[in-house]
Image (cartoon, rainbow, N blue to C red):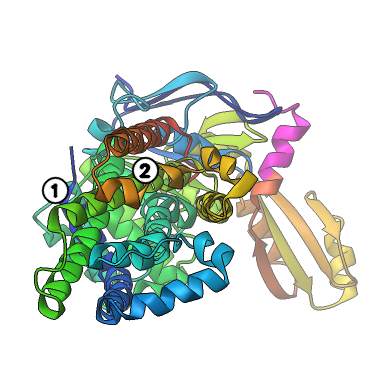
Amino acid sequence: MMNFTLLKHEMLATIKLFSIILAVLMLYIISIVYMYNPEMSNTLNKLTETMPELMSAFGMSNIGNSLIEFLSTYLYGFLLLVLPLVFIIMLANKLVIGYIDNGSMAYLIATPNTRFKIVFTQAFFLVASISVLLTATTLIAIIFSGILFPNELDLSAFLTLNIGLFFLHFAISGYCFLVSCSSKDLRTSYAYSTGIPILFYLIQALSNMGGSLEKLKYFTIYSLFTPEKLMTQDSSSFWMLGALFLIGLLCYMLAIRVFVTRDLYL
Amino acid sequence: MAMIEVNNLTKKFGDFYSVQNVELQIEKGEVFGFLGPNGAGKSTTIRHLMGFLQPTEGQCFIKGLDCRQSTAEIQKFVGYLPGEIAFIDKMTGQQFIKFIAQMRGLKDLSRAHELMQYFELNATGLIKKMSKGMKQKVGLICAFMHNPEIVILDEPTSGLDPLIQTKFIDFILAEKEKGTTIFMSSHMIEEIEKTCDRVAILNAGKIVATETIADLKKRKSKKFLIEFQSEQELSRFLGEQLKIEQIGPTQAIIKVQGNVQTLLHTLADYKINDLDIISQSLEDIFMHYYESGGKE
């Protein structure tokens, strides 16, 4: 199923990008946990009152009083959506179309490994990297919350929230991987794998502003990730997770199929 | 059974035929040359052999295995040098060779070291900083390090300096001795002539001829550029029974097919300044096939 030499190579080749993304996220997580202060959220609430549209566009509409609500507002509306997305886009493009575009894929598939094995290894590596990244951010948040505000964080709600985030990124990475496997060159692949998620995010931002724009939520994948519902473990959040998982799985399956059967000009 | 077999291979891109009805049969131990100008479809044919492309029509087989179905199985005994030189840039040459060996499940790197020594390659530097010729050597080592039965080389000597080109030709001859089947494309007739048993000439996606090198040699005429010491000498020479074309006051080109003995005997009577052999280019050979209607 997998080639471990290739897997090891990808690990070493990705460690730098991974560390940078993780370090930036860690910095933000720590400072936002640090910023948490029941009194301070009053100030932020006032800020929200003065410019509600702008704040809600970034998913910062109702800042609750608990630590988890605070974190979900400030981390899960923007930072933990966008930074992992940057990581996913760069990695997904490097893993397949990067090799095709510069021609080195010829050497990989000129070894006695089936194309399925090569592409499955790459897909596995992408999913594994995302889960390691999100596990690390979750642990960092839990540990620092525990140090600064012992017993303040609702652990089970926080874990559900992060599982939801993983499924969201799983679905998006499936899409990016599909683009990477089916594009004819690196530039086209980057354009589609960056453009569509950003478009989805902007639609989400608009629909968050409410009013007649709210209907736009049916046109973006980000609507399937709802921190408020996940934290309360609302039943509708589970079928949303299921939908995200299905989208991701279908994308990955299709991507593998496309790569195995496509023409390669190497 | 033919080692490499291409049956009626056709690949169409939109309305354009990249290759059309290509037929090839390469036997065990044969060194087979694949000649043609750029864009003739040599690489496209090779990509089909490697299973990179799905033929529009026809099939390719290596040792009886379908190149599209059994790609991984075939790669166990095939070595391949791509036409485009591309590696994973962030590795050193040695790391890359080791990486590909591991991808192959090859533990014994003695052959790779032998080859590095033979081709005088110091592969400790980053591939990104290597010259074209050094990269080509890395590619050659990757193609041969697992002692493959069949080797497919897409323009193997491009980028190599003349000294290494000669070494490469000797190396191919040694591999031939060992019984390796070699299929190599080129647009340089000299290297094909020195190494191959048979050649196929491809033009605009179609095979215009498949011949043995011996036959091709017979057809190839040699041209000599001779500079005489004086105009009188040349005008005297013009009376000889040879194919002479005057190109300057004291220079002439003589075309000889087959035996050069007569020319040398004749020349002994003349005072000349210089003699040059103009090697026949691939285009000249092609002209022959164009003239004969492109069919053989």
Which labelled disc corresponds to residue B105? 1
Left or right: A209 as drawn, with respect to B124: right
Q: Residue at 21%, 49% (x, y): give it.
A: A160
Q: Residue at 15%, 51% (x, y): give it.
A: A4
Foreground of the two, B183 or A96: A96
- Point out residue B114 in the picture as x, y percentages from the top left corner: 18, 64
Residue B50 visible in the picture: no
Q: Amino acid at mark 1?
A: Gly
Q: Is residue B36 above or below residue A187?
A: above
Q: Which residue is mark 2?
A: A171
Q: Residue at 51%, 40% (x, y): give it.
A: B34
Which labelled disc corresponds to residue B255? none
Q: Quadrant of residue A98?
A: bottom left
- Point out residue A197 in the picture as x, y percentages from the top left corner: 50, 51
Q: Secondary structure at mark 1?
A: loop
Q: Is residue B27 above or below residue B113?
A: above
| Residue interval drawn in magenta | B285-296
| Magenta-span inclusion, residue B294 | yes
Q: Amino acid at mark 2?
A: Ala
Label 2, label 1: how many angstroms apart (C-alpha)? 34 Å
Q: Are marks 2 and 1 in contact (CB under 8 Å)?
A: no
Q: Quadrant of residue B124?
A: bottom left
| Magenta-span inclusion, residue B233 | no
Q: Residue at 87%, 55% (x, y): give it.
A: B239
Foreground of the two, A5 or B17: A5
